Image (cartoon, rainbow, N blue to C red):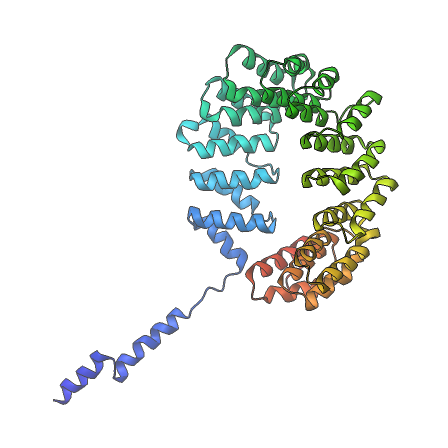
Amino acid sequence: MLLCLFLWLFVSGTGTFAAEEPSAQKKKDAVVSTKSEEEQRLDTIHYGTEMEIAALIQTLKSENTDYLDDELITLMQSTRNRTILSGVFSFFGDRDKAGLEARAIQAIEGRDEEANDTVLGAINYLGKVKAAAAIPAIEALLDTEERRFMGAAFRALGRVSGGQAGVATYLLDYYTNRNPGDEHRGEIITALGETGSNEGVTFLADIIVNKEERAVLRMAALAALSKIGDGLDAILQAVSAEDPNVRASAIAALGPFSGKQVDDTILESFRDSFYRTRIGAAEAAGKRKLTSAIPYLRFRAENDEVPTVKDAAIRALGAIETNEAIGVLESLFTNRKHPDRVRLLAAEMLITNDAGAYADTVIIELDEAKGKNQTALYNGFLKVLGSAKTRTIEDLARRFFTSGGLIEKSYALDMTANNEFRSLAPEVRALIQDKNSSLTRKAKNTLQKLGLPEE
């Protein structure tokens, strides 16, 4: 009888023996990894699934960090996983980071054994890093006329050309003699512009002045001539085109050119009723630092009915950068009656041109916006100051570290990294213990950029 009771207690978990088993299990479950974050990330690269590695790459992108690049390069040599390959090609390409050229060329040459995403990622990467060594592989790919890759290949070929006339000759022959199809003609024209070769000027000019040609091709040819910096007569003819999009493209293409006729044409284009033409005029004025355009730009910034035209005018004033242009930007920024969008972009231009002179004024407006609960304006000024490079904002960063919220502390880290405020290292280290993981990672990354230890 007693034996049965003992066994019943043991099996049911109400006795001493049964109670100890879950407790022991809890102790085992409580064991946690003592590896550092960097060690865990290395483990992810070495042993992780494609989704885990993709998530890590997104984190590295958000942190704008490169300390794992060598490990990723090593991984690329051994994997054929399409998600990993395309993800790392994109991560490196977005930063113009060399190191994967050989693997990318291998993917193109062995494309029958690679996923389409991998090959496209390789082509785009080679174009972004301007890998001249890839020219033979890309031309060989285009010779096969595999349409799934042609668009990306044409775009990349222009970028990798390095000004080599042979690439321009290849592209001209392809357009003229191989019937590439309408979907790829514009890409060939754009690639010709990327080569920077004068060999394509006459060809491109003929497309521009041909009123029977499709507008999209004429626009592509205008942009190409602008990149080459030649063919002004054809561009000026297109300024009076019936198609408003062609007119706008022609005005925007005038940026690299000089002379009174060009100046007068740009100024006259501010009167065009088509908003894209006014944007083109502002962009051209900014590229050429056309001081005679300042009154026009001011009028557009203050009165244009299209916000994107106002944006283009303000950016052009920032590019011109004379005392008169800066004075206009000051007026746009300090007048609180102007829309937030205008004030924020004007502040950005002022900080970009002379952060030391204008940071204090932006801080005053930042505090004013916070006091009036103008959240969008406040956040906009935070972003502007977060990119400022001046010792003037050190006290602001310290204030944010001490009493700011999550967003303010994040921008304080940007200010510290951009200006190398090593005196703020204790405040940065304190954030390593923050409950917010993204802030912790950013603090560690900031210390790394400053060349300082975490402890």
What is the number of callouts on the image? Answer: 0
Q: Position of residue 63 (x, y in %)?
A: 60, 51
Q: Nearer the viewer, residue 95 or 100?
A: 95
Q: Nearer the viewer, residue 262 or 200?
A: 262
- Residue at x 46%, y 19% (from the top left corner): 145
In the rendered structure, the answer to whether residue 35 lies left or right of residue 455 reads left
One can see residue 79 in this view: no
In the rendered structure, the answer to whether residue 171 lies left or right of residue 450 reads left
Q: Quadrant of the C terminus?
A: bottom right
- Residue at x 79%, y 38% (from the top left corner): 299
In the rendered structure, the answer to whether residue 327 lies left or right of residue 29 reads right
Q: Quadrant of the N terminus?
A: bottom left
In the current view of this chain or complex, which residue is farthest to the bottom? 2
- Residue at x 48%, y 47% (from the top left corner): 54
> On screen, 96 above or below 396?
above
Q: Position of residue 21 (x, y in %)?
A: 30, 76
> On screen, 401 above or below 146?
below
User: Where, by quadrant of the figure, is residue 193 drawn?
Assistant: top right
User: Where, by quadrant of the figure, is residue 28 drawn?
Assistant: bottom left
Q: Position of residue 5 (x, y in %)?
A: 16, 86
Q: Position of residue 121 (x, y in %)?
A: 50, 34
